[in-house]
Amino acid sequence: MVDTCSLIQVPSQGRKFTWTNNRRRGHVSAVLNRSFCNEAWISYFQECHQFVLQRVASDHAPILVVSEGSERPKNCPFRFQRFWTDHEDYLNAVQSSWENDIPGSPMMVMAQKLKRLKVFLRSWAKENFSNFNLEMMEAKKCMEEIQTVIDRDGISDSIYAKEADAKTKYLKALQNYEKLWAEKSRSRWRDQGDRCSKFFHILVKIRRMKNSIKSLRTVDGTLISEYVAGYYEHFHKEWDRGRLDGIPSDSEIKSAVWDLDPDSAPGPDGFPRAFYKSCWDIISSDVCKAIRWFSRTGYMPYGINNNFLILVSARISVLLNGGPVGYFGVEKGLRQGDPISPMLFIIAEEVLCRGLSELLAKNSIKALSGPRGAIIPTHILFADYVFIFSNASIRLGVSALLGKPLSILEVFWCRPDFSWIKLNVDGCSLGNPGNSGAGGVFRNHRGLVVGSFKKFLGVHTNYYTEFTALMEGILKAKELQVDALWIEMDSVAMVVALQSKSIPWFVLQDWLSVKDYLNSINWKITHCFREANCIADFLAKAVAKSRNSDVNISFPPHIRSEIAHDAESRPRFRFI
């Protein structure tokens, strides 16, 4: 229903749960009430969110939907629009601004020319590109008037030519309108909605609503912008960065620029990677001189930002609700988000690919068989995923001959390291959908139980139950103040989803409530076979049948025996 009606969930603040059964035993709390809106609502109330208020007389908490407009910054930075490059006079405009010489070091020359070009392009764009929304409506109105005349009076050569001109003008205006909103939405999908315009409008409004920071203040009363800039400056100065000592050649610099994603978001200077590609013949000399100058001196003049980030370390300005605050240099080692990280990732992928090819050549791994004459890949790379296609018989020492009996695999429950706590968690739905429950058990490095829970979740599917069980386990770990947590589940989908942070909407609020806790501790999540997760499986099935939630369960004799079995590191068996 939500997808069919194109509804969007309103961000929530305040209390976590919106309903409780108000029972002392078998207490259940859940998020049953949510606020949804459509695209038209967001257009009028772009800063809306919901507050979950206190429950008084009802089991349900009242929900208050409000719209509080945050102050928009007056210093919104320059943004280069990619559709400018389609204009016939674009390169001449850049050339006229760039060719005037500026004295100073190569890096300073490059920065000052970019700064001067921003001012020039602002005025040039205003002269050559009108209001796209108004232009599109006027072109559409003109086309409709001509077609009305054709319907009334018939067509002639002159009217036919006018209609053709009107259609051309309308299609051009529509293309410009789409390009503008496609860039604002930062989406690469081109196959959604009515000519994509409505689709991109919705994406832009949702992103602005979610990313808007409405209130943030430190204990000592520091203003929001000072706090944000100070935090990131400290964050990027924790460790010294490594230096790149080699001086690149012109061809290496051009190759690096050409490898950059032209559709990625621009830096604080407002120029995206597409700008450098489109004007390379004009600006290449200054760009290469600036990069080589930095490589020789290792000095970046204060106040200069750069967009050729793959070879030059960056200075950072934090954007707060669309306006820049703070300005500081990067002095930390590489991590996700650093400009050189994609290069190192590609190098690691290349090493892995060559290693797999070498293993195949040595017959250490066996490729899957396919149709005669077809090339069967051993691996495929997609984004940050690696898919390896191999016959596992060599690794397991099992004969690949047909008719060979199945192998028996020993499955162990592994103890956690000292000071770590291991959580085995599982969900169960009797009927899919049907009565469902979550169960989990916490054990220390000796295999002794230090906590357990089982919770009835109502009528849900297996997918919902597994995710909810995982969130319940993390919440219980937070209550137990576990500071080193090993989560183990027998659901591959749950493990992959949490590792990649692909959290579905129905547990997103739970995830946000435990995200800070997980960031403050050491934790990991791994997959296990069901044979190693039998305790959690028992608890989930038991509560789904009995509907009685509980904590610190008193286990029956056969489950106590299974716990001792795990603590003694004895195997269970799985047929494969």
Image (tube, grey):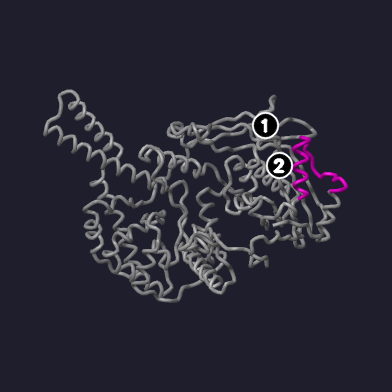
Residue pictured at 66% horizontal, 57% vertical: 524
The answer to whether residue 306 is seen in the rendering is no
The single residue placed furthest to the top in the displayed view is: 152
Q: Quadrant of residue 141?
A: top left
Examine the image and state in which quarter residue 443 appears: bottom right
Above-or-below relation of 313 to 178: below
Q: CA distance from mark 2 to mark 1?
A: 22 Å
Tell me residue 572's x, y (percent): 78, 57
Say few, some or many: other residues with alpha carbon within 10 Å of mark 1 (under 14 / 14 to 19 / 20 or more): some
The image shows residue 428, relative to residue 388, as above or below, that is above
Q: Check if residue 549 falls in the magenta segment.
A: yes
Write the start and end of the magenta stretch as one range.
534-558
In front: 384, or 86? 384
Residue bearing mark 1: 19
For the image shown, how many numbered marks are present on the structure? 2
For label 2, the SS is strand
Q: Is residue 16 magenta?
A: no
Residue that numbered label 2 is attached to: 428
Please tell me whether mark 1 sits on a helix, a strand or a loop. strand
Closest to the observer: 576 or 276? Answer: 576
The residue mark sitting in front, 2 or 1, is 2
Mark 2 vs mark 1: which is more N-terminal?
1
Q: Is residue 320 left or right of residue 124?
A: right
Q: Position of residue 46 (x, y in %)?
A: 46, 36
Q: Is residue 179 left or right of residue 428?
A: left
Amino acid beneath label 1: Trp
